[in-house]
Amino acid sequence: MPWVLAHEYHHTVWGYNYYHLKGNRGQDLLTSVISEGEADCFAKGMNPDVTPSWICALTAAQEREQWAVMKGYLYCENSMELHRRFFFGDEDTGTPPFTGYTIGFNIVREYLKARKGISFAELADKDAGEILEVSGYDGGSTD
């Protein structure tokens, strides 16, 4: 329960910033992946001894394979079809459940390593493309 509360609290703060303060009206798949990654990294910071299955749902090989596929959709408007596929899995396309959560967590974790000392309030103000670029992520975590 503490993980979920921290995760959803972060979404509330992030959403207020992204939609209300910045005036965004929609989001692409990359923004959704980064938003989930930020929320899970925030929750991990509040609950360091908890590791839910969705942040480590892929093997290294699956992560590389899924990232190669996902990259083609990053800047597509985040339709419910893409969301369901990459966050909850899709047997027809071979997409494992929680792909987006695992990849998002790893991207944001690598960004936080590269930008030591950044607060989550500052992180919530960063563009998803910048987070991806600075993270150096290319289909697998460095851990």
Image (cartoon, rainbow, N blue to C red):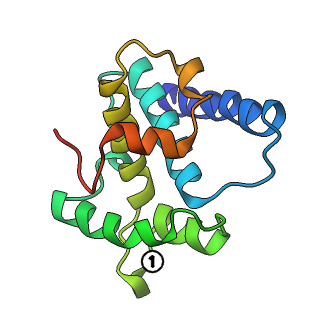
44 sits left or right of 139 in the view: right
Can residue 40 be seen from the camera position used here?
yes
Q: Position of residue 29 (x, y in %)?
A: 56, 60
Which quarter of the figure has residue 50? top left
Q: Quadrant of residue 52?
A: top left
How many numbered marks are there?
1
Residue at mark 1 = 90
Say which of 44 and 135 sits in front: 135
Towards the viewer: 136 or 64: 136
Residue at position x 19%, y 59% from top? Answer: 59
Q: Quadrant of residue 117?
A: top left
The residue sitting at the bottom extreme is 92
- Whether residue 52 is visible, yes or no, is no
Residue 6 image offset from top left, x and y in percent: 55, 26
**Which residue shows up at 26% across the image and 58% down it?**
58
Task: State the SS at label 1.
Answer: loop
Quarter of the image with the C terminus in it: top left
Q: Amino acid at mark 1?
A: Asp
Image height of 110 relative to 80, above or below: above
Q: Which residue is drawn at the image coordinates 83% and 34% (left, top)? A: 20
Q: Residue at x 52, y 34 (%)?
A: 39
Is 22 placed above or below 65 here? above
Q: Residues within 10 Å of mark 1 (few under 14, many from 20)?
A: some
- Left or right: where 111 falls relative to 124: left
> Image height check: is 93 above or below 62?
below
The residue at the far top in this view is: 117
